[in-house]
Image (cartoon, rainbow, N blue to C red):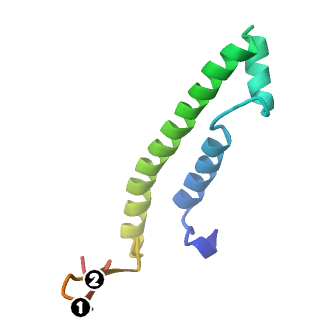
Amino acid sequence: MGQLGWTSEIAKVLALLSIGAGSMTVSHANDSYFWVVSQFSDMDTATAYKTQTGVTLVQGVTTITILMIIGFFLYYNDCRESGVGLMPSITIWGSYGSDQMVLSAKDA
């Protein structure tokens, strides 16, 4: 994960949680979890398609959204404390042609 720039412990934990959240998004008939839940809750297949697939979609999207919000604040604070910029440089192209202004994290 170092090649992606995720060297802090917070970044590694957030990556792991994101993988877990993504693996549980949209449980459908080709997933064994779908059949375990539908059979143990005495749901017929049509009801399981309607309910469990939609609920796991909401679960996955909600979890990823929450992790993005948490990650932004935790990772941003971690980068500020360590002196490493969140983004090495930001290039802003002006509306006057090729005029360019480069802002680094240390300029802010």
Q: Secondary structure at mark 1?
A: loop
As drawn, is 105 to the left or to the right of 39?
left
Residue 15 drawn above or below residue 21: below
Q: Secondary structure at mark 2?
A: strand
| Position of the N terminus by quadrant | bottom right
Residue type indicated by callout 2: Trp
| Residue 83 coordinates in the image, percent (x, y) | 38, 75
- The residue sitting at 69% across, 32% down in the picture is 27
| Residue 37 coordinates in the image, percent (x, y) | 73, 19
| Residue 59 coordinates in the image, percent (x, y) | 55, 32
Q: Residue furthest top?
A: 42
Residue 100 drawn above or below residue 65: below
| Residue 60 coordinates in the image, percent (x, y) | 56, 38
In which quadrant of the rendered view does residue 87 lie? bottom left
Residue type indicated by callout 1: Asp
As drawn, is 11 to the left or to the right of 72?
right
Query: Tag on residue 99?
Result: 1
- The residue sitting at 78% across, 33% down in the picture is 31
Query: Tag on residue 19?
Result: none
Residue 70 drawn above or below residue 39: below
Mark 2 — residue?
Answer: 93
- The residue sitting at 41% across, 48% down in the picture is 69
Badge 1 density bin: few <14, some 14–19, many ≥20, Cα 10 Å: few
